[in-house]
Image (tube, grey):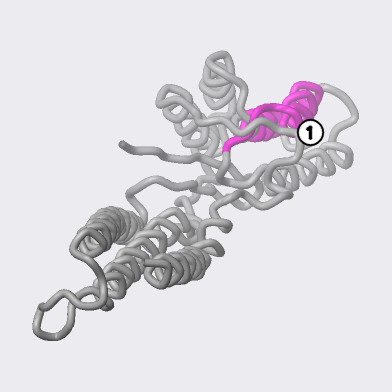
Amino acid sequence: MRFVTKRRTRMLAGVLTACSMLCALASPAMAQQEPPAEAQPEQEIVEPTEAQLSLNDDGVRAMIEGDYAGAIAQLERSIRLGEINVTYLNLGRAYQKLGRCAKAREALEKVKTAPAVQDPPPSEVRAVADQYLAELDETCTGDDAPAGGDTSKDPSSTIEPTRIDSSPNMLGWGTALSGVALIGGGVAMHFVAESERAPVVDSNGVVTDVTQREAADIEETADTYDTIGLAMGIGGAALAGVGTYLLLTDDAEGGSGDGTTVWIGSDNIGISWTHSF
C-alpha cells in the first residue's frame, strides 16, 4: 500500500507539471490581450454607447462633406451623452476648420484627460491632438477665422474613408490556445488514470499484488482522474471552438464589422468607430 501511495503522489505531481507547461503555451497570447502600457496612462478606458457611436459617425460624415457647423452640432450632442477622447478630437478639428480657435484648443486639450476608447489607443489619439494644437499655434492668433474665408462648407475636402487594419484578434487566439491547453491537460489526466490502474490489473484483467479493498480504492481514484480529464477535454474543446469562431468572424467581417475608421482628407482627419452585437 505504501508503494502505491508514493507512486500516486509522483504521478499527480507529474500531471500538474504537464498541465502547467501546456497552460504556459497560451500565456503569451493571453498576455497580449492586455492593452500596452502607453495605451492606458491616466485615462479611463470606456465603452461608448450606440447613441454616442451614431452621433460621432454623423459628425465625421458632416466634416468630410465640409459641413463643420453641422459636425459640431452632432459631436456636441455626443459629448453631452458622455465625454470620450475621440469625440473631443473630432470636435476640436471641426472648430479649427470653422475658425473657432479658442473652442478648438479647449476641445483638443480635453483629448488628453477625457475617458478614452480602447481602439484607437489613447496615445495615438493624443498624438493627433498634439499635431492639431501645433497647427493652431501656427495659424490662429485668436478666435477669428484663419485666412481663406468661410470654411463652414468645404465640399472639396471630401474623400472616401480609409479603414485602418485592426490588430490581430488576440482574444480569439488566447481563447483557442487556452482550449488546446485544457484538452492537453485532459489527455494527461487520462494517462495518469491508466498508470494508476497498471499495478492493479495485469494484461489478462486479473488483480495482482494488492488486496481487493486496495484495488477498489485505486480504481475509484483512477475513475476520478478520468472524470477530471473528460471535463477538461470538453471544456477545452468548447474554448477552442469559441476561439476559432472569434478568429473566423474577425476575418469574415472585414470592412463591415466592428472597428475603427479614420477619415483622411487633404487637410483633415476624422475618426469614427463601429460596434455591433
Three-letter residue code for mark 1: Pro
- Furthest residue toward top: 80
* Residue at the disc numbered 1: 146
Q: Decide if residue 247 is on the left or right side of residue 78.
A: left
Q: Is residue 114 magenta?
A: yes
Q: Nearer the viewer, residue 159 or 201?
A: 201
Image quarter of residue 249: bottom left
Which residue: 47% across, 40% down? 273
Give the image location of residue 268, x and y in percent: 63, 45
Q: Nearer the viewer, residue 80 or 187?
A: 187
Q: Quadrant of the C terminus?
A: top left
Image quarter of residue 40: top right
Crowd tier of the residue under label 1, counting other residues whose Cα lies within 10 Å: few below 14, some 14–19, many 20 or above: some
Q: Decide if residue 159 is on the left or right side of residue 197.
A: right
Q: Is residue 144 above or below residue 136?
A: above
Q: Main secondary structure of the magenta part?
A: helix
Which residue: 51% across, 35% down? 60
Q: Secondary structure at mark 1?
A: loop
Q: Quadrant of the N terminus?
A: bottom left
Q: Is residue 176 shown to the viewer in this render?
A: yes
Q: Is residue 128 magenta?
A: no
Give the image location of residue 206, x and y in percent: 11, 78
Q: Which residues are magenta?
A: 88-117
Q: Is residue 252 shown to the viewer in this render?
A: no
